Image (tube, helix red, strand yellow):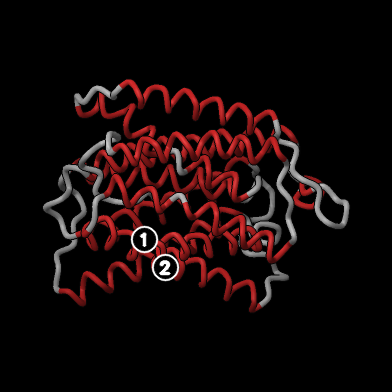
Amino acid sequence: MLLGTFAFAVMAVLINELKEEVPWQWIALARSSLAMVFGAGLVLAAGAQFVFWRPRILWMRSLAGSVSLLCGFFAMTHYDVSVVLTLTNMYPLWVAILSWPLLGQWPTGDTWIAAVVGVIGVAVLSFGTTPPVSPLGIAASQVAGTTHWSATIAIFAAIVSALTSAIALIGLHKLHTIDSRAVVTHFSFVSTMSCLGAIGAVAFAQPGSEPLGLPASATPATLIMLVCVGIAATAGQLFLTKAFTTGSPSRISVIGLAQTAFTMLFQVILHGQQFSLITLAGMALIVAPTAWVLLRGRAVADETDPPT
């Protein structure tokens, strides 16, 4: 699980480095398409069977996961990546809440308390949406072209990413009879098509504009980082799947919160980034109740797969 969270933290750092020179849709496309190729290769190597049309719940998992991926990548390229990861790691709380209408399992009282505390944490983060000042005295918003409104939209997108991750996890409950590599390949295919759709939507919304694509100034280093995004995502998915299929999901998920810590550490080492007290307080109010729900083991006992 630690290796998986470390791999996804590396992916997040790469996204942070690429966001100013590559459209976020193309970064997401690199992540999905490479995972699709690697996943299909694993299915073929294992002699497993591909799945596509059936069961229908498979499409619920893949479509919800694709929405989560698109929202997550948008958020990570428009706001502080460590804050976004904190918000997307709220998915266990959403699983607990959604388990009532979707699975008929009523959340316990402490889960509702944790959810309220988490919402307060989101409000605190929204209050402190002004990005921290860099060591050069330049606000991160000025560097990345981020405004207060785009930061607020990014926070909302991160919350939607966590919500749809929870829907995907609940859908996975009924896919335990299907080879996990085939499920990953199906999801990667659907998310790849979704990324292509997002690229096409920009062209449709802005007729006459230049096609959305890789910039002409893209260097070999840029392309290498895009490939590394796909490799890190695939490695993280494999490690997380292994962890969730061999250990207790409710307790292993707690270790997944280390992804935020890894990413913050990378940001401090690479860019000397500083975090405001309001940001740290909001993150603590989100992480603490999430960890509480997971340690209590009362989110959804049959979670079987990590978020997208």
Three-letter amino acid code of the residue under disc 2: Leu
Q: Which of marks 2 and 1 is in front?
A: 1
**Above or below, 285 relative to 40:** above
Which quadrant of the view contains residue 125?
A: top right
Residue holding disc 1: 1
Which of 37/9 is in front?
A: 9
Label 1 is placed on what type of residue? Met
For image coordinates 63% across by 36% down, the residue present is 281
Question: In front here: 1 or 208?
Answer: 1
Give the residue displayed 63% in from the left and 58% down from the top: 16
Residue 132: x and y, percent?
76, 45
Give how far apart the Cα atoms at labels 2 and 1 are. Answer: 22 Å
Q: In this view, does 83 lie to the left or right of 54?
A: right
For residue 258, the mark is none
The secondary element bearing badge 2 is classed as: helix
238 relative position to 291: left or right = left
For the N terminus, which image quadrant?
bottom left
Tag count: 2
Residue highlighted by disc 2: 34
The quadrant where residue 263 appears: bottom right
Which percent across, then down, holds residue 225? 58, 71
Q: What element carries label 1?
A: loop
